[in-house]
Image (cartoon, helix red, strand yellow):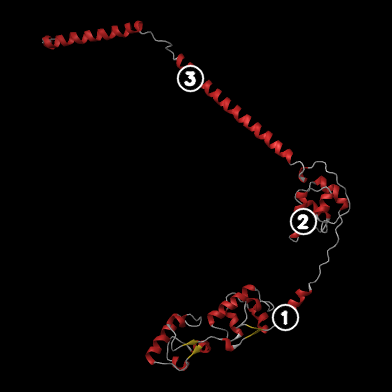
Amino acid sequence: MWKDFLYFSKGQRVGIIVLLALIFIVLVANYSLSYFFPVVNPNGAAFFEEVNAFKKTLVLRDSLQNAIWEKQYAERQRAFEEKYRNFKNFPDYKKDEPYTLFPFDPNLSDSITFVKLGIKPRIAANIMRYKSKGGAFKKPTDFAKVYGISPEKFKELEPFITIKEIIPQIDSTLLKKKQFKQDVIVDINSADTTTLMQIKGLGRGYAKGIVRYRQQLGGFVSVNQLNEIVGMRPENFDKIRPFCSVNLDMVQKIKVNIASTDRLNAHPYISFYQAKAIYEWRRYKGKLSSTNDLKDLSELTADDLIKIKPYLNFE
């Protein structure tokens, strides 16, 4: 029975023979090709030699580029030094410029005086700029704080610094303005911001607020309305109240019988619903003659009618 497993047909036997022949040919070729095509530098030495040679060319190129940059830098440096020498007559570049030391008051001295003391013109200009903005030296050590004055230079100048006491002078114009602010009485219905600022205790912010609120109201009917301005504090109102007056002829009134809802609502004392109610009530009743015709409106209270009465015109 085992012979059945080892039995091959003729075609199978031919295939096995051919396969064995091919295996033999491959093995022979593998060993014989090395004799016909020898391998040079089997460890890759040639490749690494080429890599190293390439790296050397890169280093050489970098060196050449660095050399070019260094040459350009040296040329720019020489050009800068040449240009620097061309400015040798500029005051700040003068070396060992002779100077003399003498008593001086930095609050009263000019730039020429500072230069004569051996201070560079640039630093002298800084000192003059500081003084032009209201700066002053109250004691000699303040002069050491000037930017550019070295400790050695200040130590050299300190014995010669003499600062006179500054006595503040009272500006008579300012006194007149203050006196004017105490005595003036201004009509807040016609005055502009500049005139309002003449009132003692009233600054620019309050003056603008008064003008803005006056335009919204159509004019003030009482000085007490200033309390309604945003930001007005009771103590400020008490200060300015004696110097304010109201000209009722300047008040601009709303013509109720022809005014639109938007025109009525534009007034600070009249809300949208109140303006709508007045407008609809006028359409219902016809021409209105006085605030008594508005008493039947639930949207308006007695206090509301008192507040808006000076601003309504029923003609």
Instruction: Tell me if label 1 and label 2 are in contact, CB under 8 Å.
Output: no
In this rendered view, identify the residue nearer to me: 67 or 133. 67
Q: Which residue is mark 3?
A: 51
Look at 60% across and 81% down and name the residue there. 226
Instruction: Tell me if label 3 and label 2 are in contact, CB under 8 Å.
Output: no
- Mark sitting on residue 128: 2
- Mark sitting on residue 182: 1
Question: Compared with residue 253, is residue 203 higher up or lower down, i.e. above or below?
Answer: above
Q: Amino acid at mark 2?
A: Met
Disc 2 element: helix
Residue 212 falls in image quadrant: bottom right
Q: Amino acid at mark 1?
A: Gln
Look at 59% across and 78% down and name the residue there. 211
Question: Compared with residue 24, is residue 288 higher up or lower down, i.e. above or below?
Answer: below
Q: Amino acid at mark 3?
A: Val
Residue 202 falls in image quadrant: bottom right
